[in-house]
Image (cartoon, rainbow, N blue to C red):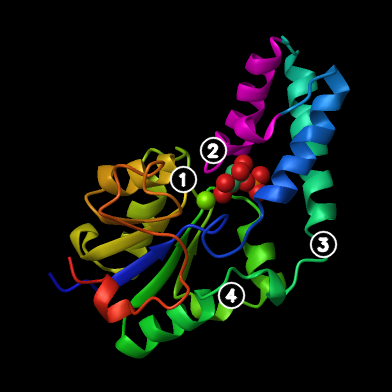
Amino acid sequence: MTYKACLFDLDGVLVDTAIYHFQAWKNLGSKFGYVLTEEQNEQLKGVSRVESLNRILAWANYSATEEQISAWLIEKNENYLELISTMNPSEILPGVVDFLGQLKKAGYKIALGSASKNAEIILAKTGLTEWFDLIVDGNMVTKSKPDPEVFLKGAMGLGVEPAACVVFEDAQAGIEAAKAGDMRAIGIGEAEMLGQADKVIPTFVGVQASELLQF
Ligand code: BG6
Ligand code: MG
């Protein structure tokens, strides 16, 4: 199969924002006396903002009012925006820029498929925007991963058949979304965590696109 497009998740694939999300959720949790653990934060990777808060409230066994939920979603995001305000190109994950360069040179189309509503800000701060032919983010979808909507919109926007797309994801929900969209999925991280992926690589360091994209 000759693939034509590569679709990238943002958080945990191109940049490591999980630490900032974790900090902001922990700060919010302290409002209702809950201490979020690192293991729980792992389970929030790839999960939308509103669904993340729902999960945290369920773990905390706290029943919040609609007003509290709306206010807390805003508060968490304001805190998160403050935490990412100093992000810069040094926070791009190792090997990413070299890999994107290889893809461009080889003629692949490149899109972003992220659950985040802050994707454009992060791409701009890290200087990654220019690499993308198309950006699909949390503002443009109604269903979050594992629903394939974000990646299908990416494929459609690029004018490429889903079967000719390869998705790069660090979260299980994202791998499931890619597979549900009839795309190939490459996991970034540990194989045990990303069982459904067609291939798993620990990082992009030293990765040759021409070899990796042979399935
Ligand atoms: C995903 C992250 O990419 O985006 C999640 O892995 C996050 O942790 C989600 O909750 C939504 O992000 P944002 O920036 O819209 O709150
Ligand atoms: Mg991710």
Q: Tell me which label, 1 or 2, sits earlier in the chain.
A: 2
Q: Which dot, 4 or 1, sits closer to the camera?
A: 1
- Residue under label 3, please give it: 85
Answer whether labels 1 and 2 touch (C-beta < 8 Å). Answer: yes
Q: Disc 2, ligand 1: is the CB inside 8 Å?
A: yes
Q: Tell me which label, 2 or 3, sits earlier in the chain.
A: 2
Image quadrant holding the N terminus, namely bottom left
Amino acid carrying mark 4 in the image = Thr
Q: Tell me which label, 4 or 1, sits earlier in the chain.
A: 4
Q: Secondary structure at mark 1?
A: loop
Q: Disc 3, ligand 1: is the CB inside 8 Å?
A: no
Query: Looking at the image, is 100 positioned above or below residue 73?
Result: below
Compute the Cα span from label 1 to label 2. Answer: 9 Å
Q: Residues within 10 Å of mark 1 (few under 14, many from 20)?
A: many
Residue ID at (75%, 27%): 70
Answer whether labels 2 and 4 touch (C-beta < 8 Å). Answer: no
Q: Which dot, 2 or 4, sits closer to the camera?
A: 2
Magenta-colored span:
37-61
- Residue under label 1, please give it: 171
Q: Tell me which label, 3 or 4, sits earlier in the chain.
A: 3
> Where does the image place residue 5, in percent across and percent down from the top left?
31, 71
Compute the Cα span from label 3 to label 4. Answer: 16 Å
Compute the Cα span from label 1 to label 3. Answer: 24 Å
Q: Is residue 139 visible?
A: no
Main SS category, magenta section: helix
Answer whether labels 3 and 4 touch (C-beta < 8 Å). Answer: no
Residue ID at (62%, 23%): 54
Residue ID at (71%, 49%): 19
Q: Secondary structure at mark 3?
A: loop
Compute the Cα span from label 4 to label 1. Answer: 22 Å
On residue 47, the disc is 2
